[in-house]
């Protein structure tokens, strides 16, 4: 069963999400680094041996990354963009599924958007709560 968050419930998750995102960002960078390494040795055997070891580590990190993303999804949280540290929390508004948006560096949920829309069409949480946006 899919989990849905209120704004306050999603905001209560932010401290844990900050830690989780730091870990996921490190894993992502390690995966990218391993993917970019190409070392050639004079000895073909050494080259193959090192390639196998690098591939093994790459796949270990990739599997760990995927398992963590899967755990988040099981909690009703979608990793949207690892580079930006952007995640979405499933929520309901006016009988429709929506995403509550949080990005690394933010202390609270500031935006939301409908699932059939996209992040670039996000709205402020004040609009979600029926409050007018103050300028």
Image: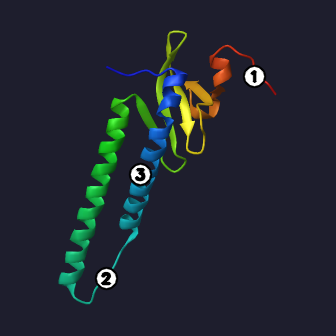
Q: Residue under label 3, please give it.
A: 23
Residue that extends furthest to the right in the rendered view of this protein: 135
Where is residue 47? Give x, y as percent.
Answer: 24, 80
On screen, residue 13 above or below 68: above
| Residue 130 makes an appearance in the image | yes
Residue that extends furthest to the bottom in the rendered view of this protein: 42
| Residue 81 makes an appearance in the image | no
Q: Residue under label 2, please give it.
A: 40
Q: Residue under label 1, please give it.
A: 133
21 vs 47, left or right, is right
Q: Image quadrant for the C terminus?
A: top right
Q: Residue at x 59, y 45 (%)?
A: 105
The tag earlier along the polypeptide, 1 or 3, is 3
The tag earlier along the polypeptide, 2 or 3, is 3
Where is residue 79? Give x, y as percent.
Answer: 44, 39
Report if the CB atoms under discs 1 and 3 are less than 8 Å apart: no
Q: Badge 1, how many Cα within 10 Å: few under 14, some, many 20+?
A: few
Q: Badge 3, how many Cα within 10 Å: few under 14, some, many 20+?
A: some
Q: Rounded to the nearest whole Å, what is the CA distance between mark 2 and mark 1?
A: 59 Å
Q: Badge 2, how many Cα within 10 Å: few under 14, some, many 20+?
A: few
């Amino acid at each position: 069963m899919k989990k849905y968050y209120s704004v306050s419930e999603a905001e209560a998750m932010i401290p844990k999400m900050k830690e989780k995102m730091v870990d996921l960002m490190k894993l992502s960078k390690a995966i990218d680094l391993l993917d970019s390494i190409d070392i050639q040795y004079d000895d073909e055997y050494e080259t193959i041996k090192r390639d196998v070891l690098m591939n093994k580590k790459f796949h270990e990190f990739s599997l760990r990354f995927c398992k963590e993303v899967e755990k988040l999804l099981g909690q009703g949280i979608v990793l949207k963009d690892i580079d930006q540290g952007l995640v979405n929390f499933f929520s309901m508004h006016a009988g429709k599924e929506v995403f509550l948006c949080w990005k690394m560096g933010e202390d609270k949920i500031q935006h939301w958007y409908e699932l059939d829309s996209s992040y670039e069409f996000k709205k402020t949480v004040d609009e979600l709560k029926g409050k007018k946006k103050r300028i």
